[in-house]
Each structure stands twice: as structure tokens, then as C-alpha cells.
Amino acid sequence: MGLEAVKMVMDTPEFELVAALDRKHGGETLGDIGFSGSQAPIYTDAAECFSEHQADVLIDLTTPEFGYVHTKTALEHGIRPVVGTTGFTEDQLLELKELSEEKELGCIIAPNFAIGAVLMMKFSQMAAKYFSDVEIIELHHDKKLDAPSGTAVKTAQMINEIREPKKQGHPDEQETMPGARGAEMNGMHIHSVRLPGLIAHQQVLFGADGETLTIRHDSYNRASFMSGVKVCVETVMKTKTLVYGLENILD
Ligand SMILES: NC(=O)C1=CN([C@@H]2O[C@H](COP(=O)(O)OP(=O)(O)OC[C@H]3O[C@@H](n4cnc5c(N)ncnc54)[C@H](OP(=O)(O)O)[C@@H]3O)[C@@H](O)[C@H]2O)C=CC1
Ligand SMILES: O=C(O)C1=N[C@H](C(=O)O)C[C@H](O)C1
């Protein structure tokens, strides 16, 4: 995702790539690692990078542990973060929101930048008004570190705002193999599938008497996320708080 974001920034005339963070190529330039046409320096340390380059925006696509440190460090240096990294805790999100408001700097954290995925989440939220029985199945490549996906968690949170809390399945159901019913949020179940060959997919299944409704989104490549990243980079310059979720900034 980081490489895809670098390409997107380099291909966007309104954007300028100032520097990059990469723990394996510190001291080199992007040109040295194959991005011909860019002499942007590569740093291993976020604080050093942000002290030497007063960029407008940080785009972070790393891991929950380092994404959190990068986001916090960016805000402390007056740089607005656009974060796609998933797996932040509620406490971390709250702390970053307080910091962004204290600094009066925009910060956008979006578990999914794909427009179709945002629509899938919104349509699922709409459906939850009429269907209180729902199971979320997310399917990803087998290099993914976090489970459930950030998108599945966000979908469940959005559904929760509408859905009547309900314990699903038979009242006496028992797992004869631990984990068979997946993770649970307010009685709703989330299942994570990991397989080589997959990229990023999710289906939200609703059930009622005699009918089911399936809402599904598929990302077939990493480029599918980049139009959302672009919108976030433009929007973060105009906000002074933390926005969690692309659905909160799209018309
Ligand atoms: N919001 C969205 O739309 C999307 C979000 N994501 C999320 O983005 C994140 C990245 O996904 P993906 O690219 O697939 O994952 P990868 O595992 O391919 O990439 C993670 C990258 O983070 C780098 N990294 C780890 N630690 C550090 C550090 N200390 N400093 C700098 N870089 C570091 C890794 O570097 P190294 O190569 O050295 O290991 C690696 O290049 C995940 O959290 C994923 O869930 C993914 C797709 C879409
Ligand atoms: O790791 C991924 O690949 C993805 N991560 C995000 C998530 O956790 O929801 C977004 C998308 O599903 C791809």
C-alpha cells in the first residue's frame, strides 16, 4: 500500500512527494529504490523526518504499532495525518482526536479508502434498520496482520448505531470447536477468512423469515484505494479535528 501511495502522489500534479519513511532504506532516495524521477529522501525515524521536512500531510500505511507512533509524531510536528493503517484501539483513537483538536490540525483515519467499500458499509447500516440478524464475513490475503479487518470493525460499529442489540443464533447454541461462531459484537458475529489469492473482500449477510440479503464488496487491486486517499489528502487540509471513516467526508 505504501508503494502504491508513493506512485499515486508522484502521479498527481497537485501533490509533491517531500520524503518517505522506510525502515530498510534510510539514507537513500526514492530514485535509488526504483522511483525514477524522485530525489525525495528516505528516513527511518519519523521525528527526524518531520523535523527536517515541514510537509502538509503524512500518509501512513504501515502497522498498528508504528502507524500510531507516526500519526502522533506527525501531529506533534504540525503535520496532518491521513491514515489507512488498521488495528488502532479505541483509546488510541481518542488520544489522537484530543491531540488533533489541541493542535487544531486535521487528521483522517479511514479503515477503508475504497469508495465501493464505504457504500457497502453505508448500505449495510441502512439494511440494519430492517434486519437485526447479521453476520459479517471479511476475506483477505494471508499477509494481513490484524483480524478482524478494520473495515469489518467499522461496519459492525455503523450497524450497531442502528441495529436493535440481539444475541443471534439459537439461545442454547454451543461451539463444539472454539471460534466456530467467530468474533462477537453485541450479539452480531464477524468471521475472518485468510487465503493466498485474495486481496480485500467483505460480505454482510442479513437474514429474516424466508429471505436473506447479501451486500458484498471486492477490491481486486491496491489501486482501488487510491482515489479515497486523494480525497482524504485534500480534505485533511480543511479540517481541524480527527475524522474516523471516509463516509464522514464524502458528499
Ligand atoms: N485503509 C485502507 O483502505 C487500507 C488499509 N490497509 C491497511 O494498511 C496497512 C498496511 O497494509 P499493507 O501495505 O497491505 O501491509 P504490508 O505488511 O505490506 O506493509 C506494511 C508496511 O509497513 C512497514 N513498516 C512496518 N514497521 C515500520 C516502521 N517502523 N517504519 C516504517 N515502516 C514500517 C513495513 O515495512 P517492511 O517492508 O520493512 O516490513 C511494510 O512495508 C495495514 O494496517 C492494512 O490493514 C491496507 C489496504 C487498504
Ligand atoms: O490489509 C488489507 O489488505 C486491508 N486492510 C483494511 C482493513 O483492515 O479493513 C482495508 C482493506 O480491507 C484492505
Image: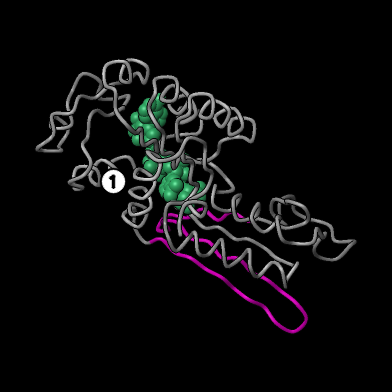
Residue at 59% in and 27% down: 95
Q: Which residues are magenta?
A: 191-219
Residue 34: quarter of image: top left
Q: Report crowding for label 1: few under 14, some 14 to 19, many 20 or more residues within 10 A (C-alpha).
A: some
Q: Quadrant of ligand 1?
A: top left
Q: Position of residue 138 (x, y in %)?
A: 55, 57
For the stretch drawn in magenta, the main secondary structure is: strand
Residue type marked 1: Glu
Residue at 80% in and 63% down: 168
| Front residue of 157 and 170 | 157
From the viewer's perspective, tell me whether residue 94 is left or right of residue 119: right
Q: Which residue is mark 1?
A: 4
Vertical placement of 221 versus 98: above or below? Answer: below
Q: Position of residue 135 (x, y in %)?
A: 67, 63
Residue at 53% in and 61% down: 202
For the N terminus, which image quadrant? top left
| Front residue of 243 and 22 | 243
In the structure shown, which secondary structural element does the residue marked by tag 1 occupy? helix
From the viewer's perspective, tell me whether residue 43 is left or right of residue 185: left
Q: Position of residue 127 (x, y in %)?
A: 65, 70
Residue at 41% in and 60% down: 219
**198 inside magenta stretch:** yes
Label 1 CB-ligand 1 distance < 8 A? yes
Q: Position of residue 105 (x, y in %)?
A: 45, 30
Residue 218: quarter of image: bottom left
